[in-house]
């Protein structure tokens, strides 16, 4: 395999380890400065130049795109994608993860538990937002922050308002997030590769510091994750469109709360804490995908007119709760169940005798019209209407 590591830091621990792991496995690998690429859109085929010269062919790339070059870096990754060069992290996935607000919006849509969070811009909306996440103390996060920089703990609502007002005056966008006191300055970093967690560590803040980042002096230790934490980590990375990611989670009384999904996770802390060859696991995964690539089933099957892939929720109204897949009528309607998801359990290619339960999620391939007919009408979210206050009470003259 011929691999290019896109990195501006060839002497960084992570870059060195990834290069060593590739060489140890007999691969040809080069570290290429992301900013030295030129995107060529003039020819009949998508192309790239490096240092002014035509780029030789590569089987795969491994993007290590820093925050400061996200826009250009993702453009380069996207061009590699157009050239059919494999990448474990797509340009879209990197962009999703790099924008903290977008990342949280995507994760919340897929029922990933997170600390209660609000995003506002108007001064009048700040206090209601603080109350909406549970009141002070709150954590204030700059959307552009990294490695714990731009993360502030405000002990009182008035202090939080003052900090947010100051940051807004400098055109900074901030998130307001509930402070999870029971985490006690600790969090979990799970390193996801493909569909599994290859290593995990617990980070602990030092002294009065509440940020557990290693760059803030936090300590690390190896940790064995429960099935629930592993499932949340893997699902979060895949929802973001990443196959190599660091998923940061808080240990709350309600279970894992996802704080962030990092598309360029550092390897030094987690390899030293766990003693595991994380770099090797990443290279092995890329090699496997180059040899036998994953296929986006939805895109490939879209050429079959009227057919596609969709997820069906088993509900009492559908009339199939308590019946087996064979007796449910799905096969007669030209619908094939590819995967059954029941809570944290995934059953691939379930048997016809598998009995369906309320709440099961079925990933199916079949006639789109038939599958649409099985989806109940979506209910609109009920909204509480408040009566307008009297003019005097509202401060009107």
Image (cartoon, rainbow, N blue to C red):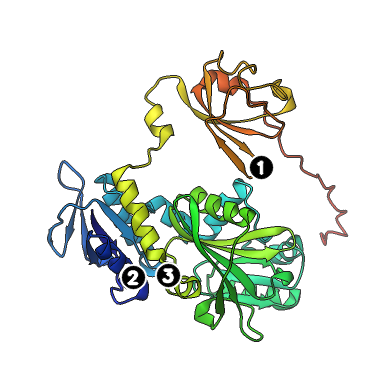
Instruction: Name the residue located 55 percent from the left edge and 58 percent from the top edge.
Output: 101
Disc 3 + disc 1, Cβ < 8 Å? no
Q: Residues within 10 Å of mark 2 (few under 14, many from 20)?
A: some
Q: Residue 59's x, y, as percent?
A: 24, 50
Q: Residue 302's x, y, as percent?
A: 40, 27
Residue at the far top in the pictured view: 332
Q: Residues within 10 Å of mark 3 (few under 14, many from 20)?
A: many
Q: In this orientation, which residue lies closer to the viewer: 370 or 144?
A: 370
Disc 3 + disc 2, Cβ < 8 Å? yes
Residue 166 visible within the image? no
The quarter of the displayed image where residue 210 is located: bottom right
Q: Earlier in the sequence, mark 3 or mark 1?
A: 3
| Quadrant for the C terminus in the image | bottom right
Q: Earlier in the sequence, mark 3 or mark 2?
A: 2
Where is mark 1, residue-wise?
A: 343
Q: In this orientation, which residue lies closer to the viewer: 2 or 72?
A: 2
Where is mark 2, residue-wise?
A: 17
Q: Earlier in the sequence, mark 2 or mark 1?
A: 2
Query: Against 324, is 188 above or below?
Result: below
Asked whether, in this view, residue 301 is left or right of residue 338, the answer is left
Q: Residue 168's x, y, as percent?
A: 58, 71
Instruction: Name the residue located 22 percent from the left edge and 64 percent from the top edge.
Output: 30
State the CA–CA distance, disc 2 to disc 1: 37 Å
- Identify the secondary structure beneath mark 1: loop
- Identify the secondary structure beneath mark 2: helix
Query: Against 188, is 320 above or below?
Result: above
Instruction: Name the residue located 56 percent from the left edge and 80 percent from the top edge.
Output: 219
Q: In this orientation, which residue lies closer to the viewer: 209 or 169?
A: 209
State the CA–CA distance, disc 3 to disc 1: 31 Å
Where is mark 3, residue-wise?
A: 267
Query: Against 371, is 342 above or below?
Result: below
């Amino acid at each position: 395999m011929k691999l290019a590591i896109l990195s501006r830091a060839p002497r960084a621990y992570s870059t060195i380890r990834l290069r060593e792991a590739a060489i140890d496995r007999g691969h040809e690998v080069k570290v290429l400065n992301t900013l030295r690429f030129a995107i060529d859109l003039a020819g009949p085929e998508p192309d790239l130049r490096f240092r002014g010269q035509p780029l030789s062919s590569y089987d795969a790339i491994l993007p290590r795109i820093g925050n400061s070059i996200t826009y250009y870096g993702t453009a380069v990754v996207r061009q590699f994608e157009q050239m059919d060069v494999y990448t474990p992290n797509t340009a879209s996935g990197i962009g999703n993860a790099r924008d903290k607000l977008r990342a949280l919006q995507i994760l919340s849509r897929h029922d990933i538990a997170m600390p209660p969070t609000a995003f506002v811009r108007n001064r009048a909306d700040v206090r209601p937002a603080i109350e909406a996440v549970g009141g002070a103390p709150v954590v204030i996060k700059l959307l552009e922050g990294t490695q714990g920089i731009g993360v502030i703990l405000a002990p009182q609502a008035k202090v939080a308002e003052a900090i947010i007002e100051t940051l807004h005056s400098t055109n900074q966008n901030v998130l307001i997030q509930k402070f999870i006191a029971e985490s006690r300055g600790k969090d979990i970093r799970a390193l996801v590769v493909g569909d599994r967690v290859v290593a995990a560590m617990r980070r602990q803040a030092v002294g009065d510091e509440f940020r557990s980042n290693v760059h803030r002096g936090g300590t690390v230790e190896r940790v064995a994750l429960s099935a629930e934490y592993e499932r949340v980590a893997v699902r979060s990375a895949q929802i973001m469109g990443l196959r190599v990611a660091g998923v940061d989670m808080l240990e709350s009384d309600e279970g894992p709360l996802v704080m962030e999904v990092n598309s360029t996770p550092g390897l030094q802390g987690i390899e030293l804490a766990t003693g595991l060859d994380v770099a090797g696991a990443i290279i092995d995964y890329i090699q496997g995908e180059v040899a036998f690539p994953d296929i986006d089933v939805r895109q490939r099957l879209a050429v079959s007119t009227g057919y596609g892939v969709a997820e069906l929720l088993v509900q009492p109204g559908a009339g199939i709760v308590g019946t087996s897949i064979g007796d449910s009528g799905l096969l007669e309607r030209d619908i094939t169940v590819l995967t059954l998801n029941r809570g944290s359990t995934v059953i691939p290619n379930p048997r016809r005798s598998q009995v369906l339960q309320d709440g099961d999620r079925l990933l199916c391939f079949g006639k789109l019209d038939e599958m649409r007919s099985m989806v109940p009408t979506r209910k609109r979210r009920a909204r509480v209407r408040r009566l307008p206050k009297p003019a005097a009470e509202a401060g009107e003259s």
